[in-house]
Amino acid sequence: MQEILNRPAKFLTQGQREAYFADGFIGVKGLVDAHWLERLNEVTNEFIEISKDYSSERKDKRFDLEPDHSAENPRLRRLNSPVDHHEAYWDFASTGPFVDIAEDLLGPNVKFHHAKLNFKWGGGGEEVKWHQDIQFWPHTNYQVLTLGVYLDDVTADMAPMRIIPDSHNGPLYDLYDNDGNWTGNIRDAEVPKLGTERAVYLGGPAGSITAHNCRCVHGSPPNNSPRPRPLLLCAYSAAHALPITDLTKGGKYAETIVRGEPARWAQFDPRPVLMPPDWSKTRYKSIFEHQQGDG
């Protein structure tokens, strides 16, 4: 941590970097400029139109759709791996401000891991229950983070991401239920121990960013506003953090060095990490499908 903080900041302030290491996350309002937002929203609207040709019965691997999604009433939960489907997303993930932010928080050598675009559709867009990220895609250490940018204004009634401060320094939780089934969320019996009353909600105008460490406990309530809440999320790691599973195998840009150089030595954190199911033997489902028990 101190070695990273001793390097000059590229994009964030020193105070923002210190807050990230202390709390495990930061939110910065209006950080991404109008040029990027216009480009990202244009292509995102194109994918919303494409999704109207699909449904929960007629599936397309690009889309995670709510069960009642239709052409007349589109209700997207997620655009999977957006960087694989349009160059605008990859240009942003590999050359936009996220790369400078990742360097500010991970050090000089940074890898891209994966991306997704969560819509959290209006009028009841589904809850994301309390969870941590790293159990979905474990690495050899915990210098792994996710950066998000809101593509539209997000007010308090639009289910902004909520994160529990300092939870990255706490335990990793079991995301299997009592019968050994992967649910992708912390068990209900554990939730009273989390200190959820301390959670910080990260909203803001379009272009606001979120950054959270892979061990942070976070989630979001249902979106009961009339508008969707599109949040583009990109995960990055320090180059010396190696994925343990092959979840992103076949991804066009998975494990691409976006800043600096590849690591010559892997680093291993002595703390254990929960392993997810063997996705090579069963279809990987999104966090929405697992938590809602559908798909």
Image (spheres, helix red, strand yellow):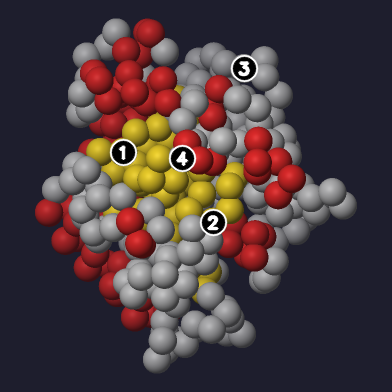
Quickly name the residue at label 2: 128
Locate the C terminus by quadrant: bottom right
What amino acid is labelled 4 in the image? Ala
From the viewer's perspective, tell me whether residue 2 is left or right of residue 276: left
Please give the label number shown on residue 27.
Answer: 1
The answer to whether residue 97 of the structure is visible from this angle is yes
Q: Is residue 58 above or below residue 42?
A: below
Quickly name the residue at label 4: 199
Earlier-in-chain disc, 1 versus 4:
1
Locate the N terminus by quadrant: top left
Quickly name the residue at label 3: 268
Question: What distance separates the C-alpha of mark 4 from that of mark 2?
Answer: 14 Å
Secondary structure under the numbered disc 1 in the rendered image: strand
Give the total number of marks visible in the rendering.
Answer: 4
Q: Is residue 288 above or below residue 190?
A: below
Neighbour tally class for label 4: few under 14, some 14-19, many 20 plus, Cα within 10 Å = some
* Residue drawn at x 49%, y 82% as measured from the top left: 69
Earlier-in-chain disc, 3 versus 4:
4
* Residue drawn at x 66%, y 60% as measured from the top left: 290
What amino acid is labelled 3 in the image? Phe
Q: Position of residue 278 (x, y in %)?
A: 75, 48
Q: Nearer the viewer, mark 3 or mark 4?
A: 4
Secondary structure under the numbered disc 4 in the rendered image: loop
From the viewer's perspective, tell me whether residue 99 is left or right of residue 160: left
Q: Position of residue 75 (x, y in %)?
A: 44, 77
Q: Nearer the viewer, mark 3 or mark 1?
A: 1
What amino acid is labelled 1 in the image? Gly
